[in-house]
Image (cartoon, helix red, strand yellow):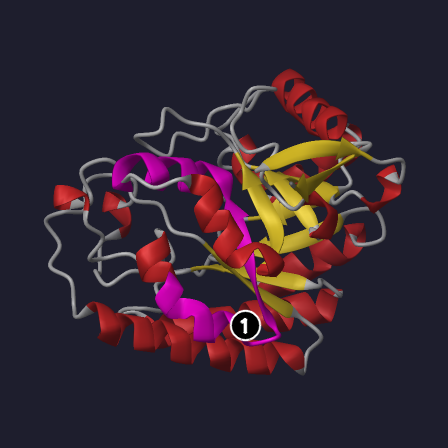
Amino acid sequence: MKHLEKRKDCHKNPRIALSSTCLGNTDIKSLCEYAEVNNIRSIELSANIPFISDKELVKTLETYTDRINFYIHNYFPAPKDSFVLNLAHPATHERSLKHCLKAVDLCSSLGIAVYSIHAGMAINPSADDLGKSLSRYAPIDLKESRDLLTTACHEIAGYALGKGVRILIENNVINEGNCPENVNRHYHFADPAESEKLFTLFSNPNIGVLLDAGHLKVNATNLNFKPHNFINLFREKINAIHLSDNDGRYDQNLPIDEQSWFWQYLPWEQLEYVSLEIKECSSHLIKKQIGLIEKQLCGYKAVTV
C-alpha cells in the first residue's frame, strides 16, 4: 500500500509542465507567449499545434529555450500531411518511425532530454476516428504488432542514445466499447497481462515510461484491474506523468482535484516532469490546477509500506 510521507527537499520535486493541449488549437508562438505571461516554465508540445516549417519551428523554440523547458510528445512536430502515428501496424510503421527519429533530432538540437511516444495498437484507424469507437477495425495478430513496436522502439532508443535523448513510452487507453468482452486484443501497454509481454522492451536502459494517469483509470475500470498493480509492474521505469481525470469509462481529460485517485501511488521523487493534460481551459483554471499539483507535491514523496 502507498501513502504520502513528508519531506523537506521540495527542490527535488519534478518540473510541472503544461501540455499544449490545454490551450486547444494554438500556434507555437502564441503558446510560448502565453507561457511567459503566465509564468509557466515548462511546456509539453503535443499534436494540437498546427504544422509549421522546420525553419520557423526551430527559430521560435530557440527564442525561448533559455526561459522555458520544452518536452516533445509523440506527434509533435505535426507533419504537413496528417496521419495516425502508430509504430505497431505495418500500414503506418515506416512513416511513424521516420517521424520519431526526426523528433529525436529536434530534441537533440534544442537540448531537450526526453521524447515520449504512444505505445501503438494492432489496428489502423483513421485520424477522424481517434477518440471514438474503434471496435469495427480488424486487428492484425497482436504478437506481430508487438514485434513491430518493439523493433521500432529499440531502433529509436538506440538512435536517441547517441543524441543524448531518452525515450519514454506512454500507456495506451481503451475507452468503453473498444474492448468487447473486456478482453484486450488490440492495444499495447494498456493492461497488466499484455504489458508484461513488453518487459524485454523496457529492459532497454534508454527506454522509460510516461504514465498517463487518466488512461490508467479508464483501463482499470473497463478491463477490471487495480491501477496500482499496473504502476508497480513498471515503477522503476516511470520518468514522467500525464495528469487528468475522467469518469472511468472514457478518457475525458477533466480537471484533477485533491481526491483524484493517483496521488498516493505514483513515484513522484523519480520523475523528470509532470504534465497537466486537461481539455481546453481558462487561464484561471490552469493556474488553479498547477497550484494544486504544487501543493500536493511540495514536501511529500510516495513510499511503500
Q: Nearer the viewer, residue 181 or 207?
A: 181
Q: Which residues are magenta?
A: 196-223
Q: In which quarter of the view is residue 123 placed?
A: bottom left
Q: In which quarter of the view is residue 258 placed?
A: top right
Q: Is residue 84 visible?
A: no
Query: Is residue 101 left or right of 185 when viewed as pictured?
Result: right
Give the residue pinned by disc 1.
102
**Magenta segment includes 295:** no
Query: SS at mark 1?
Result: helix
The x and y percentages for residue 127 are 28, 50
With respect to residue 219, does 123 lie above or below? below
Query: Is residue 265 left or right of 302 when viewed as pictured?
Result: left
Total residue callouts: 1
The x and y percentages for residue 107 are 66, 66
Q: Is residue 276 visible?
A: yes
Residue furthest out toward the front: 305
Query: Is residue 293 left or right of 48 when viewed as pictured?
Result: right
Name which residue lies at 12% across and 43% down. 181
Name which residue lies at 48% across and 29% down. 279
Query: Is residue 210 left or right of 300 when viewed as pictured?
Result: left
Name which residue lies at 61% across and 32% down. 263
Q: Quadrant of the N terminus?
A: top right
Q: In which quarter of the view is residue 93 placed?
A: bottom left
The x and y percentages for residue 50 are 49, 48
The x and y percentages for residue 243 are 55, 36
Main secondary structure type of the part rendered in magenta:
helix
